[in-house]
Amino acid sequence: MRLAELSRQSGVSTATIKYYLREGLLAPGRQVNATTAEYDEEHLRRLRLVRALIQVGKVPVATVKEVLGHVDDDSLGRTIRLGAALWALPQGPEPDEEDPATVTARAEVDRLLARLGWETSREMSTLSPVHRSLVAAVATLKRLGYPCDAEALAPYAELMRRVAQLDLDSMETHASEAEQVETAVSSAVLFEPVLRSLHRLAQEEESARRYGIE
Amino acid sequence: MRLAELSRQSGVSTATIKYYLREGLLAPGRQVNATTAEYDEEHLRRLRLVRALIQVGKVPVATVKEVLGHVDDDSLGRTIRLGAALWALPQGPEPDEEDPATVTARAEVDRLLARLGWETSREMSTLSPVHRSLVAAVATLKRLGYPCDAEALAPYAELMRRVAQLDLDSMETHASEAEQVETAVSSAVLFEPVLRSLHRLAQEEESARRYGIE
DNA sequence: CATGTTTAGATAGTGCCGCTACCCAAGGGA
DNA sequence: TCCCTTGGGTAGCGGCACTATCTAAACATG
């Protein structure tokens, strides 16, 4: 498969594929001679993943490169590799430590994790970007005056824990060991629009059920 | 409160506030004379909401304007106003009707909604952007070869329905009638980072629980 | 062998978006 | 009086994801 064919099968323009090659998002094809390179199914698969991350997940190109670097790092064990890949995924803005709302938000998140018994997350607390972005998001809501304490968040967290269980169940049944990290990244990034859509559909449905169409 | 004070209290530069005023995201202040306008708490609150939508929710400026237009439209009833506001919120790319994956995805989503009994959503099926973006997201996953059928999605949808119930419960207890639409928008947009963070934290937690730290 | 197409590789440019810097003339406080 | 701030307007900037255009080399076809 050469460049034009890769472009045809993926629906991505050759110019864009060259751009991805330049940026290191895609491994170069097997160089046949100075003007020919051969690509295979693996390239096609990876290209589709890159496209999906960028277009659906809105992940910046630089971040995609970083995430894929972790996915491909054979020197790491599965859990670490997964952690590293998710670790690199884009988060919201950093919490503003100046802001008093950040301080209370951090305390609230800590209470929440204690209440849930998520000790792994608590140990990581100051390190993990996920944890930091949670603090920042809670702080924003608090600043706008919305109630956002551990009691209110706990039932949400419990539901998301069950979502995560579904994620891992489906990962275990459907993916080979080699694919599991990639699957986990997809589930973290590509499945989010599905969840978001289901969430909003459910809001509309529930709202219509409670208040009628008016 | 004048411009500089509004800027100080919100942490947004005067230049940016002027930009928002120009773009119609913020109502002009009460004009005292040619070189002075007076702003109040309502302006501050709205500015913070705009900021949060743009920075946390990554909602494009033009879309924020549209959403706020619906929020402020007194001629509509609550449910319609809520629907209109959520309707305007940004969605992923449109489904590509050429693609066979889109066709099967649409069928799958329809089966899912039938299974769940979400008839309201089914009636809206071709109209609602939320529905369309769900189809597009499912199609993307299918194209990448991930299993994504009604059976697999149903438990996720059920969990998201319960999340939506929590949303509406908290909206009912915490917001006055006048604020409910704004609260719903916040919950749809600003609460999403919280959910996403909780989701990823839960994934890390559950992964560590199942496979250890390695 | 001539001709046209395709390729890799490089460089410069485009379009959008969220600001941001600068300028101006008109108040208003010291 | 003098200077600082204000609203209002315009032009430009920086980042990002491409995209267009070039070149020289390698085939593919008649």
Image (cartoon, coloured by chain):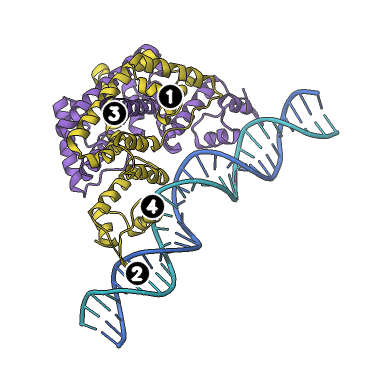
Chain colours: A yellow, B purple, C blue, D cyan
Residue wearing tag 2: A34
- The kind of residue tagged 3 is Ser
Q: Earlier in the sequence, mark 2 or mark 4?
A: 4
Query: In which image quadrant can residue A82 be found?
Result: top left
Whether discs 4 and 1 lie on one chain: the answer is yes
Residue wearing tag 1: A125
Q: Is residue A214 visible?
A: no
Residue wearing tag 4: A24
Whether discs 2 and 4 lie on one chain: the answer is yes
Question: SS class of the residue under badge 4?
Answer: loop
Q: Position of residue B37 (x, y in %)?
A: 62, 27
Q: Residue B207, labelled with which disc?
A: 3
Q: Is residue A213 left or right of residue B7?
A: left
Q: Is residue A160 visible?
A: yes
- Above or below — where is A81 with respect to B5? below
Check the residue under mark 2 and report the chain it is in: A
| Quarter of the image with the C terminus of chain A in it | top left
Q: Position of residue B160 (x, y in %)?
A: 26, 24
Cα–Cα span, label 2 and label 4: 19 Å
